Image (tube, coloured by chain):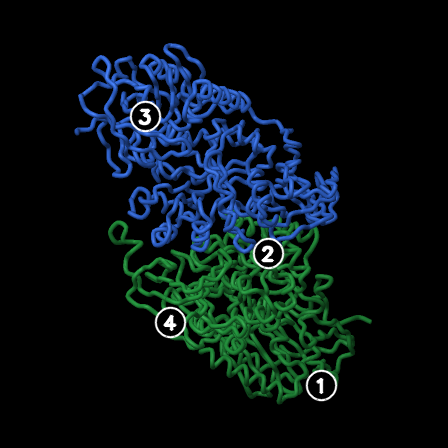
Chain colours: A blue, B green
Amino acid sequence: MGSPAQQGTALCDLNLVNCTIIDVFAGRFLPHSTISIRNGRIAGINDNLEARKTEDMGGAYVAPGLIDAHVHIESSLLPPCEYARIVMPHGTTAVIADPHEIVNVLGYDGMRYMLNASQDLPLDVFFMIPSCVPATDFDSAGASFYASDMYPFLQDTRVLGLGEVMNYPGVLHREPSLLDKIALFRNAGKPIDGHAPGLSGADLSTYIAEGIGSDHECTTPGEALEKVSKGMYVMLREGSTARDLRQLLPAVTPESAMRFMFCSDDRHSNDLRDEGHIDYCLRLSLKNGMDPISAFRIACANAPSWFGIKDMGAIRPGYKADLVCFSSFENFHVERVYKNGKLAAQNGQLVVEMPKLAPPIRDSVNIKWLTSEDFIIPDKGKKVRVIEAKPDSILTENRVVEPLVKNGTCVSDLDRDILKLFVIERHTGSGNIGKGFISGLGLKRGALGSTISHDSHNMIIAGVDDVSIFKAARHLNKIKGGLVFTIGDQVILDLPLPIAGLMSDKDADFVIERLKAFDMVYHEEGMLNPEPLMALSFMALPVIPKLKLTDRGLVDVEHFTTVDLYVDD
Amino acid sequence: MGSPAQQGTALCDLNLVNCTIIDVFAGRFLPHSTISIRNGRIAGINDNLEARKTEDMGGAYVAPGLIDAHVHIESSLLPPCEYARIVMPHGTTAVIADPHEIVNVLGYDGMRYMLNASQDLPLDVFFMIPSCVPATDFDSAGASFYASDMYPFLQDTRVLGLGEVMNYPGVLHREPSLLDKIALFRNAGKPIDGHAPGLSGADLSTYIAEGIGSDHECTTPGEALEKVSKGMYVMLREGSTARDLRQLLPAVTPESAMRFMFCSDDRHSNDLRDEGHIDYCLRLSLKNGMDPISAFRIACANAPSWFGIKDMGAIRPGYKADLVCFSSFENFHVERVYKNGKLAAQNGQLVVEMPKLAPPIRDSVNIKWLTSEDFIIPDKGKKVRVIEAKPDSILTENRVVEPLVKNGTCVSDLDRDILKLFVIERHTGSGNIGKGFISGLGLKRGALGSTISHDSHNMIIAGVDDVSIFKAARHLNKIKGGLVFTIGDQVILDLPLPIAGLMSDKDADFVIERLKAFDMVYHEEGMLNPEPLMALSFMALPVIPKLKLTDRGLVDVEHFTTVDLYVDD
């Protein structure tokens, strides 16, 4: 710690001279500035401190590191170390992750895995504990996560609060087990993230009064402003699918900017690598006329305020020396990234060592032994319900049709684009198989299967014939989860995701390449839906209307009830 | 709690309709608004909720309750209940108090007393634990307060953090017992207030990096901006003596407003009653051109952010319904004050019941039996040091003069305005008496005495003759502390302050009247210093240059050393 009074004057490790600092506190630029760094933290700003090393920034802007306020890392299909590898060159130095997907599969072990797998990364990965595991009572998740399960994690300094409370009806109806979770975090003075698409008026006020203080589901400026005025932090989301940022910009003014954050929520690895991350949010915002001070408050400073992180979000003595450097607001591109005072990335290339993949977690795919018999859908001389999927929406229609019958069984009907659909419980080997039909994918042969199906992530397979379907199921079991396309007994393409059936153990380039290969297959096979596996991943989510299939059967989401596949006339 | 879903729609207690809400979150006005209140908290904003009672605000502005971010309640000479009585009609609904004075006198008991005495008030009184008790090693305080003494108070929900760290040299020199205190609060994630007049550059950065996050001692816009840019919250102080607000206004812009707060620090009861409190800060700021949104963020919203208070500072669902109503920014006057949803004051008059004075605390004046002999200053044929007090400053000069000698003793010399000065240890009956001389008061006869003398609050008496001085000492002992003016053996005027020798047990009007009577006496007696007792109260504070007197003798503050009264040629 040095002798008395040395603290302020001890030799620094690095002086960055000739910086134009983005001062997020006073809301101004500080040109011709020097940032002094010691032991990975800011030691001084224009304080005439001596340093071992000096770098001339040539007048470049220097801002605090960028922060993603809400992300499901699992959506990138990458483990935390590979996720860090692709986002850090874009200027991201911290993310607040909600490991909702892996915890639905592996519960306590999943939460612990994400903490372990992210602990020694140059990227700071913080966590919000998933609040809604299981998401519903209509299907079988791999785990449940109650307040008592969460309690041990509260002690972890990287666990910040309670993750998005998607079950807002549960808040309004005062469901005891949900209120237990909220009370646990509220009493600890920790933040609780919200998820309340379209909620307004008295219901919104009730939701907020329960202690839920943020939302990332706004889609109009009016919705955002009501939420801000009622005290919420609003996250401007730019995911791969949900791209809400641009529409929300009119709500952001210099007066209100301190109540907004950027987040990606769900963003694919190729978008992260090629389009960007929070730097992309900044680029969009600046291009659309947001003033730079507001933009960087939103990108850097506000998340630490909301989440109670005490040592990042600004260039301030004592804070981590997490910095991004760039030359222009008009054509915003991060040129250098410093993490804990060390150069971490330059011109889009990572220059720090990234730790190896964390030790593997237990296998997550545990299905009861299947036979081809399991995929028979008997004809009962009745009409059947069909999930009608649409491109660009996770909402479905609920159709009732006369099935195509062959040899006494209902089969896929290519003429009408009606495919057999199965959801196979994969956590406990229960043997549950939900059976149904789906239209709108446009698959002409073979079967598509995945172990990603929100939120319980059971195995979901749609296919033309039983041989392909059976093969897809067996292959997904063999590769411990992932994505697969089969034709007959042949695997055409797969992407193994052995970490909980959700994340790859390979590097980002491998994952991106395989996903591109899937895109080519979709195209070659002439499918209607541009992302049929993505579409499938929402077909087992029984909280999005209208008709969905779980391992326990069909769910009529509008009436919040299970329904039979067969319909009496 | 009501049946499911009733929470949001249960009958409210009160609807305030036709309000123009000051929306401190989005930074805008919400005209034609309705605020719904239930169980003392905001239930909704424009949510069409039904209420038992409706009040039409006629378009008036409605803002959150005003908050004083840093106050020594003791400086008003009032106990917390009487303090609340005079500040609440001015719109103050919460204060963050640092009971530095009473804790210097009574330690743990003083801290506990302030918590008890403020617990059932309509005013919310929060506390920062005094960090510098005792303030120095040069005198004898009534108590010491180490990290281990503070720990039990951390559990109290009204204890927010560590009070102003005045001992900034101690931070820079890494004094272990001070760092212990800082670590205690820092590890608990609680705020630590600063006090760093003029500190800048590397020293300021070191002070901030240690975790100290606010300052209320700025006197120039440049000083304030450096502190804000380095991450501090800066308090704009408008006390009775230290009136810094106006000078600091150029530092406040809409971009930086979120990093400022108002505070009074030390404000007399007459100023509080007649001039105002935080409403006065608002009035000054608005008159000098501050935009209203910034002004109310500073007056209401920012203190809860800094101090981590989770349910006040804005009109927000779930927050306390603490509201101030007024008609104009140009001529800003608080017309109505609601506290916890109930009308608390109207047109300057309190309309809620104020709890009675808390049960008395133990007597604080404990002096060794005195005789008139104790006040003799023998002549040693040498020159003596004289503290030269100046009007409007607590800085003193260090003079050396030939004393006036009568009957072998040094005596007061009216021709040169040199009075005998004594500081009598009053906490432990040690018999310590510091002896010296003071010029600049202009007292022509009698003696002035007080048990208020920062920071240890020993008894301080300046007088023309030993009889008056002896009488003053005896009377202060008799009334258990307070202020006194004696002439010979007669008490001309007193103000008993039996609570720790610092606060009255009478009401605010009595205190204000007595203080006015003292003012008249000063005037009638033709004194040079307009507030000689106030001046005296800083003459024993051995951290303010140049020469001060403690119960252990004279202190040369510039050289941080004790010095003898007598000076060899």
> In 3D space, how far apart are the residues under numbered discs 4 and 3 (Cα atoms)?
70 Å
Same-subunit check for callouts 4 and 2? yes
The disc numbered 1 marks a residue on which chain? B
Q: Which residue is identified by label 3? A: A438
- Residue at the image point whose x is 29% and y is 15% from the top: A370
Type of amino acid at the residue the image marks with label 1: Leu
Type of amino acid at the residue the image marks with label 4: Pro
* Numbered marks: total: 4
| Relative to A99, residue B243 above or below | below
Same-subunit check for callouts 3 and 2? no
Q: Are marks 1 and 2 in contact (CB under 8 Å)?
A: no
> In 3D space, how far apart are the residues under numbered discs 3 and 2 (Cα atoms)?
54 Å
- Residue at the image point whose x is 38% and y is 20% from the top: A443
Of the pair B286 and A417, the residue shown nearer to us: A417
Q: Which residue is identified by label 1? A: B414
Q: Are marks 3 and 1 in contact (CB under 8 Å)?
A: no
The disc numbered 3 marks a residue on which chain? A
Q: Which residue is identified by label 2? A: B255
Left or right of B144, for residue A47: right
Nearer mark to the viewer, of 1 and 2: 2
- Residue at the image point whose x is 58% and y is 50% from the top: A294
> In 3D space, how far apart are the residues under numbered discs 4 and 1 (Cα atoms)?
48 Å
In primary-sequence order, the first of circles 1 and 2 is 2
Q: Which residue is identified by label 4? A: B355
Q: Are marks 4 and 1 in contact (CB under 8 Å)?
A: no
Q: Dot 4, crowdedness within 10 Å: few (<14), some or many (≥20)?
A: some
Type of amino acid at the residue the image marks with label 3: Ile
Same-subunit check for callouts 3 and 1? no
